[in-house]
Image (cartoon, rainbow, N blue to C red):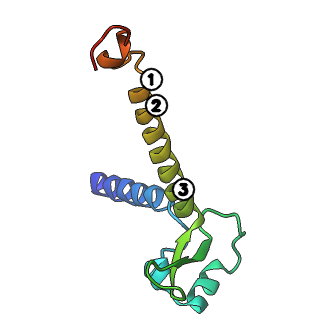
Amino acid sequence: MPKTAILVILVGLSTASTAGAGEPETALARVPSEMTGEEIDAYNMGRAADSPDYIRCRRIDQIGSLVRKLRVCNTNAEWRRITDKGNQGARDTLETVSRSFNNGQEPRDQSEPMIGRPR
């Protein structure tokens, strides 16, 4: 019986420690973009605007339409992750392009002098 009690206590402690580790206080019922404005307001109640769990919405222009906008909502942490991922992609692309243009070698046909060479 004591081994069973210890096992129950250990399972309870591990469940309690994983529930509070890095997860938001209130689990979202749906994806933020699918939530209504009232649901987002209720979720954000009592949270600081700079909190990682605070939900922000943006209206993004729809390609091919002059008027239509797409409402995209994410937490501050998710917006930060999206921005960081885009910035890293831009840095990687710039590094790749600069490496290919700055390899220190000229093309063979441009490295030889043009004097006396038939065209």
Q: CA distance from mark 2 to mark 3?
A: 23 Å
72 vs 103, left or right, is right
Residue indicated by mark 2:
98
79 vs 41, left or right, is left
Task: Identify the secondary structure beneath mark 2.
Answer: helix
Seen in the picture, residue 92 relative to 43 is either above or below; the reply is: above
Residue indicated by mark 3:
83
**In front: 68, or 85?**
68
**In front: 91, or 103?**
103
Q: CA distance from mark 3 to mark 1?
A: 28 Å
What amino acid type is highlighted by mark number 2? Ser
Write down the quadrant of residue 111 in the picture. top left
Seen in the picture, residue 110 relative to 6 is either above or below; the reply is: above
49 vs 28, left or right, is right
Badge 1, how many Cα within 10 Å: few under 14, some, many 20+? few
Between discs 3 and 1, the one toward the N terminus: 3
